[in-house]
Image (spheres, rainbow, N blue to C red):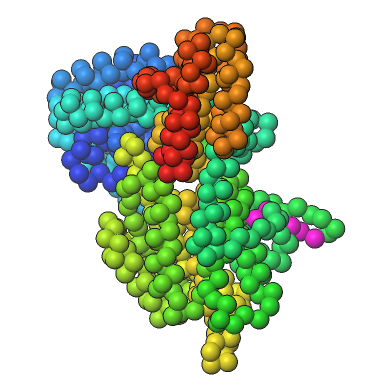
Amino acid sequence: MRSYLIVDIIKIVNTEDNLEIMRHSASHVMAEAVLSIFPDAKFGIGPAIEDGFYYDFDLPRPLTPDDLPVIEEKMTEIIKADLPFNHREITKAEAKKLFASQPYKLELIEEIPDEKVGIYEQGNFVDLCRGPHVKSTGEIKAFKLTNIAGAYWRGNERFPMLQRIYGTAFNNQKELDGHLATIEEAKKRDHRKLGKELDLFLMPEEIGGGLVIYTPKGGRIRTVVEDFWRQEHFANGYEILYTPHIGLSKLWEISGHLDFYQENMYSPITIDEQEYYLKPMNCPFHMLAYKSRLRSYRELPLRWAELGTVYRYERSGVLLGLMRVRGFTQDDAHIICTPEQMNGEIDEVLRFSLHMLRTFGFAKYKVFLSTRPLDAIGDEKLWKAAEDALRRVIDENRLDYEVDEGGGAFYGPKIDIKIEDALGRQWQATTIQFDFNEPERFDLTYVGADGQEHRPYMIHRALLGAWERFFGLLIEHYAGAFPVWLAPVQVKLIPVADRHLDYARKLESELKSRGVRAEVDDRSERMNLKIRQAQLEKIPYMLVVGDKEVADNTVSVRLRSGEQLPTQSFASFLEAISADIANKV
Ligand SMILES: [Zn+2]
Ligand SMILES: [Zn+2]
């Protein structure tokens, strides 16, 4: 099993704490073990990463999972031998001699600005490295090699593909076992695997990387979410805009995207000798809608939302299932308001976003506040007021947060909300971002109570973020067993024999008329096989109907967990499932 993982999403950590020092040291030990098996191995880099370490190798043959235990055994020998890690500083000329047969190391040596370079030696292995390391290999405790992947040298597809071995190390076996169990669970929940098994979406090679087709079941879920989203937006004082997928180069010149965002945009399409670009963002269209006439302070705030499908260039090496794609739909909105309205609007957006996230079952959040960077544009006072508004609303909601000083975009401060999934992993969802750039570029104004023209505040926000990524999260969070209100099929009717088919069909049409998504399994298969199938499809309710149920107008209810509920009247089942759907559980 080989997966192609991606340098960008892997967080290379600084070797500061002891666990990370041990993990990085383990990568050197792994490299020594690999060298003993493949004397001609060429070495890339071997950093500690979040939850473990890796090392990239150029080897004479592809590795297979069977190689891992062999390498582990060698590593265990090296650890048992308790070899010291020796550090030396040598001149670049010496280093070049020492690493003469290591082209990747030579490349790295060239780029080191200092006169001297650091090397670390243990046993038969010497590496170009700044350290730090543990004192000797014996300090490496419980470790495990977890995965083999292909990885381009320097994460760039124009360079050779190396073989990466991932591993992890912990202070004791118990912590290691706990971590490995989490990885196993994450594999079971992988949205790419479940997406195939549950027939939710496709990403066929023929349409190109990072582009998604939603199949009927995935389409159902998306429709339910979008309907809910629209209803909530109208209820919260938003209006919905629809805008085109392409726009003239002139638009992107005004907005500034061709200056500061072009590397993320696709090449232009020429129509009638004019250049059009696929939209990477929806904002410029909303700005034009605002500017279509003179605006009075009486109209503000304007809250304009759009499920806007945008296209952004991502390197092929970083694409990952639904989590990193090239075409995606943002649940975008722009709020245009007066300075006096800003605090209230920020309050509302945060409340709204938490309401949405909670409805989808995400109960833990981490908030990140990013403040004014050095290259900021716009009035310092405006920045200060906007940052204060963001800080205050986080405090008032008693949310756990971190400040990224100077980490804001050049055009405004923002808060990002990361949600924690069922495995405790954090994912970016909501963004609330001030913008002092576009109102300026599009010259947005409103006429105030004083009869003068003023510049409004503009806030971009996405609550769920990108639908694609949010869907991936939902799949993994629920391990594909969606709550009733989201399940693409909510009820599977299972007739025991063909003579019960009419009754099953009658119930199906009653359920459908009440807005319940129901299906009859009318195949002439054994009942148990049909139940098993419905369980695999993670359908919340199975209604088994036979002679007794037909005679009494009842249903025998099974849950996807395998639990059997007492036989009940069809009317009471209908009431119960309608309540589930209404309560969004
Ligand atoms: Zn090192
Ligand atoms: Zn925007």
User: With 189 as the anchor, is 134 left or right in this view?
Assistant: left
Q: Dividing the image into 4 quarters, which one contains the N terminus?
A: top left
Q: Position of residue 295 (x, y in %)?
A: 62, 80
Q: Nearer the viewer, residue 369 or 307?
A: 307
Report which quarter residue 327 is drawn in: top right
**Which residue is located at x 30 percent, y 62 percent?**
397
Answer above or below: position of 171 versus 493. below
Question: In which quadrant of this rendering is ligand 1 seen?
Answer: top left
386 drawn magenta? no
Residue 486 visible to the viewer:
yes
Q: Dividing the image into 4 quarters, which one contains the C terminus?
A: top left
Q: Nearer the viewer, residue 572 or 305?
A: 572
Q: Nearer the viewer, residue 216 or 329?
A: 216
Residue 325 visible to the viewer:
no
User: With 307 as the anchor, is 47 left or right in this view?
Assistant: left
Residue occupying the far right of the picture:
272
